[in-house]
Amino acid sequence: MTHRLEVNGAPFDVRASGLEPLSRVLREQLGLTGTKVACGRGECGACTVLVGGRPRLSCTVPAVLVREPVRTVEDLADETAQLRAEFADRGAFQCGFCTPGQVVTAWAVLRDEAGRPPDGRRERVTHAMSGVLCRCTGYQAITAAICHVAETSDEPTSAP
């Protein structure tokens, strides 16, 4: 079955059948391999993309059911430069496999944190990031990086 998706601002006609996950369509048909698939069951968060501006586990979302714009880590590259630099400075990256999911989710967290008071920020960030597992690092560096960007960024995170 042919299905039209808007991915990273461009329309695509893709072939997807039944419950074929969005992650497979992104990687195999559109060549967007930044989205990683580790568990394939929605347990690790490595496959996180934005659907309609909200983080979604693309390995659990049937492509044929997607009706809202999709943004992948590739599309967020410019908007996440400061975040990625902060992750690197704090040693929040190691093997890099979960990094795309971490970055996409963190982008959404920063968007949601814009204009919010700093009280309770660390807890909100920790909760929001809890769905993206990392086997290589502790989460303190990841949380610290996101909180630092939220406190120091002059660039508002745009809506998708």
Image (cartoon, rainbow, N blue to C red):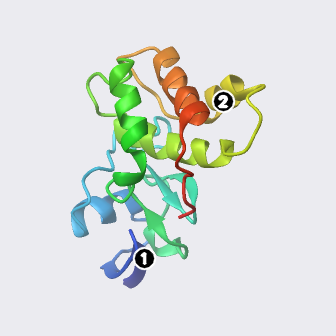
Residue 46 visible in image: no
- Above or below, 145 relative to 53: above
- Which of disc 1 and disc 2 is earlier in sequence? 1
Residue 93: % across, % down? 33, 25
Residue 75: % across, % down? 36, 60
- Above or below, 91 relative to 127: above
Q: How many marks?
A: 2
Residue 69 visible in image: yes
As drawn, the label of residue 6 is 1
Task: Tell me the residue that label 2 is attached to.
Answer: 127
Residue 94: % across, % down? 29, 21
Inspect the image, locate mark 2, and give the three-letter code of the amino acid beneath it.
Answer: His
The 10 Å Cα crowd at callout 1, few under 14, some 14 to 19, many 20 or more, is some
Q: Which residue reaches farthest front?
A: 154
Inspect the image, locate mark 1, and give the three-letter code of the amino acid beneath it.
Answer: Glu
Q: Could you give the CA–CA distance between mark 2 and mark 1, rounded to whole angstroms?
A: 29 Å
For residue 30, side relative to residue 78 (left or right): left
Which residue is at a point 35% across and 53% down the rendered structure image?
Answer: 78
- Above or below, 134 relative to 42: above
